[in-house]
Amino acid sequence: MPLTLFILTFLAAGLVKGVTGMGLPTIAMGLLGTAMPPAAAAAMLVMPSFVTNVWQLLAGPAKGRLLRRLWPMMLCIVLGTVGGAALLVRVDPSLSRTALGIMLIAYAGYALISPDFSVPGRMESWLSPVVGLVTGMITGATGVFVMPAVPYLQSLGLDKDELVQALGLSFTISTVALALGLMAHGAFRLDQWGLSGLAIIPALLGMWAGQKVRARISPRRFKQCFLAFLILLGIELAWRPFS
């Protein structure tokens, strides 16, 4: 993969995360997936995703309370991701790209519609592990962390700062679990650690720039453009094996 494309991918992914608070793994997987097998792309995003999500997780006082509340979901994310990573590694890359494309379309379509719903407190004790397991299996199979974890966390009635931290917690756990799953299935080599570490620099620069951009433009308009781009990227990835 050309170094210029590699750097621009993580600059763009960091920019989106700086503006919206999410999207780095989604953008990175989508763009890298056009140039390499999804398993290799997933290995590239581990370090920048971990660093930026830990930064997001630690930027607030609610991390202990959220961990006590959400630990069943986080545990099931780990179990599902480590198991699901076998699909990312062993399945034909063209099928993995199709699955990744479908997931990008599904997430972007959901986010554009933004249905407003809430989960009753009495359901949380059993629904959290289910959502965590499904999220983990999808993460392991596609490298995308967002579904159905993001809609579920948005439905829990958290305030704005708590939601940002909860997303950071979920994405951090997903990143660590994805790294473990890739290593367990022999798909995260020593040379990839170096490249993944190198990606931290453009990702952080992009995130810093995104935070500056967020102060100057409408986050809502930016999000709409970002989601429209994800749909187009998802269509391209999903259609590629049939073209």
Image: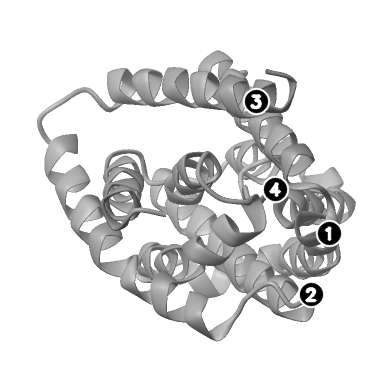
Residue marked by disc 4: 142
* SS at circle 4: helix
Q: CA distance from mark 3 to mark 4?
A: 16 Å
Residue marked by disc 1: 90
Residue marked by disc 2: 185
Count numbered badges in the picture: 4
Q: Is residue 212 visible?
A: yes
- Residue mark closest to the camera, 1 vs 4: 1
Q: Amino acid at mark 4?
A: Thr
Q: Amino acid at mark 2?
A: His
- Picture coordinates of residue 36, whole percent (x, y): 55, 50
Give the colouring mode of the picture. one colour
Q: Badge 3, how many Cα within 10 Å: few under 14, some, many 20+?
A: some
Residue drawn at (27%, 44%), measured in percent from left and top?
Answer: 15
Residue drawn at (30%, 58%), measured in percent from left and top?
Answer: 3
- Residue mark closest to the camera, 3 vs 4: 3
On screen, 124 above or below 242? below
Q: Are marks 2 and 1 in contact (CB under 8 Å)?
A: yes
Q: Quadrant of residue 181?
A: bottom right
Q: Does residue 129 appear to the left or right of 139 in the view shown? A: right
Q: Amino acid at mark 3?
A: Arg
